Image (cartoon, rainbow, N blue to C red):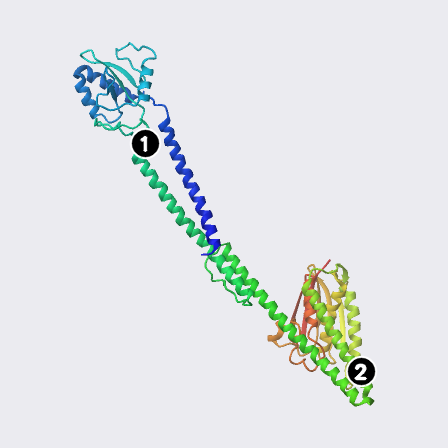
Amino acid sequence: MGRLFWKFFVSILLAQVAATIGIGGAFWLRDQARQKSVPSLDSGPPAAVALDAAAATLRHGGAAALRDLLGELRRPQLFVLDPARRELLGRTVPASLLREVERELAQDAPNDWTGAHWRGARRLTGPDGQRYIAFVPRQFGRPEGMRGGGAPGPLAPALDPGARRRVGQSVAIGAAVAASLLFAALLAWYFSRPIRALRSAFEAAAAGDLAPRFGPGSKGGDELNDLGRDFDRMSERLRALMDGQRRLLHDVSHELRSPLARMQAAVGLAHQQPDKMISSLERIERESERMDKLVGELLTLSRLEAMPDALRREPVDLTDLLDSIVADARFEAAQRDLRERRAPGPATRILIEADGSAMVSGDADLLWSALENVVRNAAKHGAQGGIVMVTVGCDDGQARVDVLDRGPGIAAADLAAIFQPFFRSGASRSSVDGHGLGLAIAQRVVHAHGGEIVACNRDDGGLKVTITLPLV
């Protein structure tokens, strides 16, 4: 068992023992108070009846008959003292009780032996003229030495609870302590067991093992088991982040290796063929631009992942933003059509439809980057010579932007992955230039602004990307 178990165990045990001692001490103090209390006489109806019976017995049967009565009487306990102050059955009367009897009898008429009633004590006169004193003590229990039955024996103080009661109390306290010990052990084990399991899970996580250990089927539904399941979710999230970082590092290395390899080839060609220096420099310039663009996109992606809430907030009109983005995309599409020396035919057209202004609150530069990535992606991947349609509208407190193209679309199995960094569909890996970061950046920008972005294939061919953002 660990130290935490013993801390729980000792704390709970001390609390239980303290409660037990408190309860036992209360009973002990009560008994001590009874033992130390001033003896008193019983003046109730049963005592009066017993005294009347003693007076009648003594008057008609004498001391012998009265002694027999005392031997048979159980409750209330009746004591009779002869003129020599000896109890008829040989029972010892405590001095404190005897003083109380004398005090009561001496209050009003100490010389009256006619049989008047005195608060549980009475003077009696026998047939032979002998004077007796009868009294009934107030009983708080059945003290030793005042047992009914007349058998003389060693007497204890009048209100002593007796050895039997003391033994019973000792047994009760011992049982309470044993129960406290067992309860403390069980409770300490119950608390320390899941904590020990959590400690082993943390040690495994520190060693690099992030496998879940507290599944949904773990027993119990208390806070400690909830903590274990929270640890599972945390470790699963950490494992996903670490896997993502490893994939990102691998993809970045791969993306950087290709332009670096082409730049090295261009430098080698320039050394071997000085007459081709101009074309080699142009190749180096293009590759350096590609690397600069890749680094810029990675920095934007890292910023969005590290501080998604640290954004500038200002009113932005999505309609004006998209007008500028579509104008730039039209220019790039025209230049691309000329550069590829396409056969005569319809050029790629990029159209925009807007119902009016759509004001949102956010970072204009990041929103520009997100919308531009989506529109340029549609222009690159859409069917060449087709139409890319951009629509802007407002609905139920949300600004909605739809970007539709007539390209080949995305395989259904890849729709959930197109927003992952460096993802490119099989058809575009070799035919379209890019790093696969545009849609990933767009998704993180939209999420940072409290919106949503989804993609789906169109029924009649092509891809549809929908962006929703809360209106101002």
* Observer able to see residue 462: no
**Residue 462 placement (x, y as % from top left):** 67, 76
**Residue 328 placement (x, y as % from top left):** 79, 73
**Residue 452 placement (x, y as % from top left):** 66, 65
Please tell me in which quadrant of the rendered image residue 36 appears.
top left
The residue drawn where x is 28% and y is 13% is 116
* Observer able to see residue 1: yes
Q: Is residue 177 left or right of residue 406?
A: left
Q: Which residue is mark 1?
A: 161
The residue drawn where x is 43% and y is 49% is 184
The residue drawn where x is 24% and y is 21% is 87
The residue drawn where x is 34% and y is 39% is 170
Residue type pointed to by label 1: Pro
80 or 76: nearer the viewer: 80
415 or 83: nearer the viewer: 83
Q: CA distance from mark 1 to mark 2?
A: 113 Å
Q: Which residue is mark 2?
A: 282
Q: Is residue 166 above or below residue 187?
A: above
N-term mark: 1 or 2: 1
**Residue 79 placement (x, y as % from top left):** 25, 21
